[in-house]
Amino acid sequence: MENKIVKAINVSQVFHMNAGNGEESYATNSNFQRCGLTKTKHFRDKAILQICSSTSKTLGFAELGCATGSNTLFVASELMDTVYQNCCELGRPTPEFHIYLNDLPGNDFNSTFQSLQGFYDNIKDTKGYEFGPCFVYGVPGSFYGRLFPSQSLHFVHSSYSLHWLSQVRIVANSSRLYHNLYSGKCVLICKVPQGIEGNKRNVYMSKSSPPSVLNAYFEQFHNDFSSFLKSRSVEVVEGGGMVFMVAGRRSEDRTSNENAYIWELIGVAINELVSKGVIEDEKLHSFNFPLYMPSPTELKYLIKSERSFVTNAIEAIDQVWTSPNTKKSECEEVVTCLRAVMEPLLAEQFGKEVMEELFSTFREIVFDRYSKEKNAFTTTVLVVSLTRMG
């Protein structure tokens, strides 16, 4: 029986964070991401120092999935601070910095561009007029394909982006060969006469999802992540570094509650609105979140298979939603952050007119579950450091 694609979401056309600087914007509600960046600084410092030995007169840096707000240029500033200090210690001039900010075309690049003068002024104030110079470019497009000239990048960074898939293809029937990630042998996944029909009322992988759904999600991640590595292998110079943070899981169980719990709660909220007649049943059945949270084993396997990068480190860290930079409760952080991230995609599927009620319902569910299952709200983040092989 041939595979039948039931639903495909073109993420590049509809996915972006909430724009602007308002109460529900990503710029206002990205403290969670900033805490993650702060917590993983030592990974980037080590990788950046490795490329400081280069005598190149230019240094190309790309922030992939840059979004908008104060986090957008956070790592770029960090990179320049580290390189500047290293050059001062060695008594040599700093290179010319080429900073590339990438995200999908729907991203609020304008807000970032409007903040650039302040960014440039701060460089002059803290490092003097002889530093750099530094040039910042906006590069709209999907990082699952080529974005930059060959061998133009020395360091690549991405945070909280690579778990998003380019699309979700759920097959109704599948009979395919999958590589066993642990032994390297091929095993046959038997025909499963279920696909998205068997995933009804779920919006992500769950314990009740049939194997065809789990395999379809992994296959899409496999294709996307391999394309990501292949594209970067052309753009990153030999010896160049790449560090990325991705929502993931320690367990090899793809339906583990690590990270998936939050998406399950959004699904509960959507189901509740379906039961009230606010959302059409078919809209729920045809929707699946375009994300896959990998395990360290899966990442190691895919990186090794692509053969362009050597793995320096893969480490799982726990991250809570509370932040010293906000007075919000952990529950409020969950709700406002997820709304800033997911509202455009959910509005595209279910309609803008139901967003207030949807997130109000989600808020009630989060506050109720948090009082009973606080530990379930801890997020697993995988930090990966790679070096481009020769």
Image (cartoon, rainbow, N blue to C red):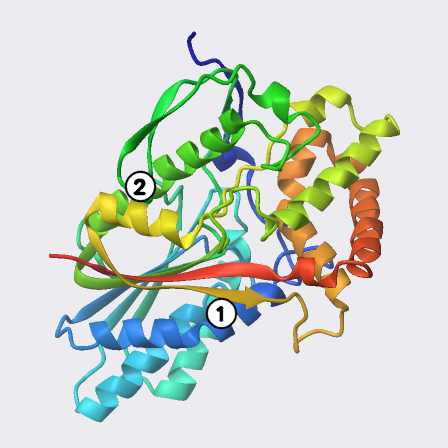
> Which quadrant of the figure has residue 125?
bottom left
> Residue type at mark 1?
Leu
Label 2 residue SS: helix
Q: Is residue 2 visible?
A: yes
Front: mark 2 or 1: 2
Q: CA distance from mark 2 to mark 1?
A: 24 Å
Measured as percent of width and height from the top left, residue 114 is found at 52, 62
> Which quadrant of the figure has residue 33?
bottom right
| Rendered residue at 31%/41% (across/down) | 226
Out of 139 and 271, give the one closest to the viewer: 271
Q: Quadrant of the N terminus?
A: top left
| Rendered residue at 40%/80% (across/down) | 123
Label 1 residue SS: helix
> Residue type at mark 2?
Ser
Tell me: residue 248, above or below residue 39: above
- Contact? badges 2 and 1 (CB < 8 Å): no
Q: Is residue 282 left or right of residue 42?
A: right
Tell me: residue 96, above or below residue 240: below
Measured as percent of width and height from the top left, residue 203 is found at 64, 34
Q: Quadrant of the C terminus?
A: bottom left
> Which quadrant of the figure has residue 111?
bottom right
Q: Which mark is residue 226?
A: 2
Q: Is residue 9 visible?
A: no
Q: Which mark is residue 340?
A: none
Measured as percent of width and height from the top left, residue 309 is found at 22, 54
Measured as percent of width and height from the top left, residue 135 is found at 32, 65
Give the crowd class for mark 2: few <14, some 14-19, many >=20 residues within 10 Å.
some
The residue at which mark 1 appears reads as: 37
Q: Is residue 265 left or right of residue 19?
A: right
| Rendered residue at 22%/74% (across/down) | 50
Name which of mark 2 and mark 1 comes first in the sequence: 1
